[in-house]
Image: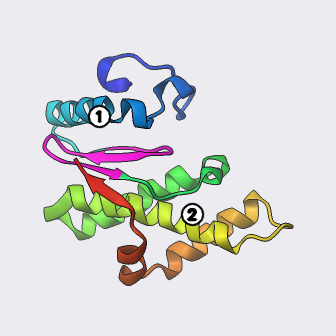
Amino acid sequence: MISSGSGTSSGVDASAVDTITESNLEASVRSIKNFAGATGAVIAVTGAIDIVADENKAYIIRNGYPMMSRITGTGCMLSAMTTAYITANQDNMLEAAAASVCAMGLCGELAFERLDGRDGNSTYRNYIIDEVYNLTAEKLEKGAKYEIM
């Protein structure tokens, strides 16, 4: 991980060695909280299990769909959404960042449900964009899958 000065990333993507799993979740949360404390930042780490944390609290988020990792631009979309959520909620940056990660993952789930056998990753990307456009607070509240550590 970048916080410890180690890691095996390739470009912007982490390698399988750095993947957050159920078996390393608690240790990952501790490390991310420590990094957040050292930097004074809210830290978001995304993958099959997402973690959004400050030094005191971590949101473990389980929204999303594996195919999202094969769509160019989903990370950029998430960055833009996070910026918008934080800008609109500057007094609650941790919660805003966690909400944006939940929202993006939920939109990936909803978009996948729309695919049929003829659709590919380009259609999936467009459906994600449509789901972001059509996302409501009610849909997000109902569909967000998270726990707090």
Q: Is residue 39 above or below residue 116?
A: above
Q: Is residue 40 above or below residue 6?
A: below
Quarter of the rendering containing residue 113: bottom right
Q: Position of residue 47 (x, y in %)?
A: 49, 43
Q: Is residue 85 left or right of residue 106?
A: left
Residue at the outermost right position: 118
Please state which amino acid type lies under the numbered disc 1: Glu
Mark 1 or 2, nearer chain start: 1
State the residue at coordinates (51%, 50%). Answer: 75
Give the image's coloring scheme.
rainbow
Q: Is residue 58 above or below residue 5?
A: below
Q: Is residue 140 left or right of residue 64?
A: left
Residue 26, labelled with which disc? 1
- Magenta span of residues: 44-60
State the residue at coordinates (66%, 63%). Answer: 125
Residue 58 within the magenta-colored segment of the rendering: yes
State the residue at coordinates (39%, 16%). Answer: 6
Q: Is residue 141 left or right of residue 75?
A: left
Question: Where, quadrant-wise, is the N terminus in this rendering?
Answer: top left
Q: Which residue is mark 2?
A: 108
Q: Is residue 113 above or below residue 12?
A: below
Residue at the outermost front position: 23
Dot 1 and dot 2 residues touching (CB under 8 Å)? no
Label 2 secondary element: helix
Q: Is residue 102 left or right of residue 124?
A: left
Label 1 secondary element: helix
Q: Position of residue 58 (x, y in %)?
A: 24, 47
**Mark whose residue sits in front, 1 or 2:** 1
